Amino acid sequence: MAPLDPHSFTDSTHPLTTHVSLSLYFDFSSATIHGAALFTLSSPYSGQLSLDTRSLSIHQVLSPSTLSPLPFSLSPSPDPIKGILLSVSLPNDNSLSSFIITFSTSPCSSALQWLSPRQTFNKKHPFVFTQCQSIHARSILPCQDTPASRICYSALLNVPRELSAVMSARHVDRRLPVSGEGFSSLLPNGFNSLWCSDTRVVEEFDMSQPIPPYLFAFAVGELGFREVGPRTRVYSEAAEGVLEAAAKEFAGTEEMIRQGEKLFGDYEWERFDLLVLPPSFPYGGMENPRMVFLTPTVIKGDASGAQVVAHELAHSWTGNLITNKNNDHFWLNEGFTTYAERRIVEVVQGEDRAVLNIGIGWRGLNEEMERFKDNLEFTKLKTNQEGVDPDAVYSQVPYEKGFQFLWRIERQIGRPAFDEFLKKYIATFKFKSIDTETFLDFLKANVPGIEKEIDLVLWTEGTGIPPDAYEPVSNLYSKIVSLANEFKLGRMPREDEVADWQGQEWELYLENLPKSVEASQVLALDARYRLSESKDYEVKVSFLQMAILSKCRDFYGEVEKTLKEVGRMKYLRPLYTALVQGVGKEEEKILAKRVFSEARDCYHPIAQGVVESIFSKHL
Ligand code: BES
Ligand code: ZN
């Protein structure tokens, strides 16, 4: 077997799945989904076929025409990263291009967070949502869970009738269940007979464009929506305040889609809806096609909410149309998207704001070099993730070094030529999964001689930040950085100097301060600007991180409160790390352990894993 993906059991000599047809019964009382799925392969096959699973119960594998059982086996112990290999035996005498699997998820499925009514905004109904990137789709359904494969799907979601569902797919219908429809008659544990109970409703979806498995997504809960543009609705828990604020925050979305189309070509996914999740959503945003998932922390009434939407929108071209072949080439998704995001931001919010974002990214990139100083592999663009959990090495490097690489090429050939190159790149590789070499070959073929101007090997295979990376320049950016430098000498910014600062200005300012300062300075800064109480979590967390590292105990109460109210890993990671890293931290370590034990149940399983891995490194 030729290696295809370090994170998947998928065998490169097997045909890939092209379509999955799912019937899913959501049992909220046991936090379990019971499923039956028809898999279609790209060509008929006989023999053992390898699929990825994690914490799934596999009940039966069936031949679709006869419904006779087919033999299957599960690897005896899970690989800590890849999970469990499911080998399905397709008959030798009569090769099949499709088969059915019946299965159930486990309450600890790593892709799913089940929220009890108490954990939701309205406190009336439960909620469940997915997060499949990078390798969690396999904990919802058995699949060839590698982005090298691209799958179309259809789905019948059977849910309690007071709830509704959204997916990364076209919504076909919401209707009463029909007896025996789809593969529901094959559902395990008696759920076939509950399918048509009068407390249930079926939400039907269809995704006719092929997507990598990590873009499979749904959310089920008491959802409401507002129209915000001709192809955009914003969904969230049906609570007046939340929907209102979200609709306002994202009012400019259509303009961004239009600008994206001008820059990168047609928007291919028809709709661009947004779903605002509960605060435990572990990321800022997730580019699920047709239905982007967002943390509620982006709703704060300034430019930054739109920045996250610009990023997830940009994935509609880079990531969702052109996809990294496996996670070693993750920078192809995130580096291109960061570049594309900033181009959209530049048009809709102006150059100053785009430069500010580049500056925040530049600081972030430099900090990651510190984080990975003993593990230089993850300062490369093209990485080797054999034996490595992608969640554990998630960082700014693919985003910001990737951005810097593309920006470097843009500087070399000029913006008009680079824009043309980008459009051609997207048109050439859309709906394909590619690797770094494919990109470099395309670059060299379309920009002859580029390898003589830019050290492409150093950029893609070298560690650290190449010498021709570039710190941005603008008046606003330089002013903020120099004010931060003056703080080190004891001068705080005057009120007139910060009068029109938004969250991102403060974020850049704080990111440029020393990691730790005198506790008295932390107190003085907060006394004047109340950063510890900022509504903007980027600002608040950056400030609290400095407070912890400066051992300024006055803010530990606020740290605890923050760790208990949000589950976005971008905030959990620096706060928990600041608490447990380094010597002489006994009090902070006790605090971290207590807070985590109390907050753990409110975090998404992926976030739980990340905090646990921070603890295992430092405790
Ligand atoms: N695709 C990512 C989120 C992701 C990456 C999830 C890897 C799981 C594994 C998404 O597009 C993203 O980059 N989100 C950022 C938004 C930011 C860059 C504006 C985030 O969540 O912080
Ligand atoms: Zn992204």
Image: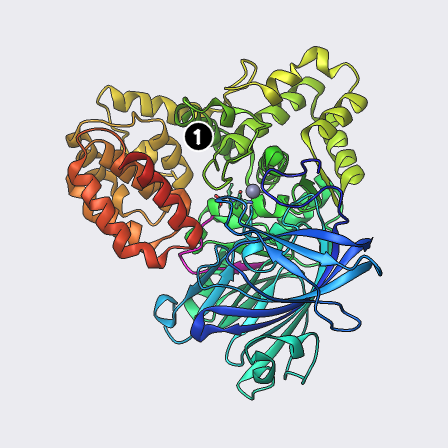
- Of residues 349 and 120, which is closer to you in this image? 120
User: Disc 1 marks which residue?
Assistant: 364
Q: In this view of the protein, can residue 165 be seen by the observer?
A: yes
Query: Which secondary structure, mark 1?
Result: helix
Q: Is residue 282 magenta?
A: yes
- Left-right relation of 585 to 356: left
- Left-right relation of 113 to 38: left
In the picture, which quadrant includes the N terminus? top right
Q: Residue furthest top?
A: 452
- Of residues 428 and 132, which is closer to you in this image? 132
Residue found 77% across the figure and 27% down from its top: 442
In the picture, which quadrant includes the C terminus? top left
Q: Which residues are magenta?
A: 274-283
Q: Is residue 112 above or below residue 161?
A: above
Residue found 34% across the figure and 70% down from its top: 118
Residue 465: give x, y in percent of width and height. 51, 19
- Left-right relation of 270 to 117: right
Quarter-wise, where is residue 575 in the image? top left
Q: In this view of the protein, can residue 251 be seen by the observer?
A: no
Q: Is residue 82 magenta?
A: no
Q: Is residue 556 above or below residue 521?
A: below
Quarter-wise, where is residue 569 in the image? top left
- Identify the amino acid type marked 1: Gly
Q: How many marks?
A: 1
- Give the main secondary structure, helix, strand or loop, of the magenta stretch: loop
Residue 426: give x, y in percent of width and height. 75, 38
Q: Residues within 10 Å of mark 1 (few under 14, many from 20)?
A: some
Residue 182: give x, y in percent of width and height. 70, 75
Residue found 60% across the figure and 37% down from its top: 6
Residue 174: give x, y in percent of width and height. 64, 77
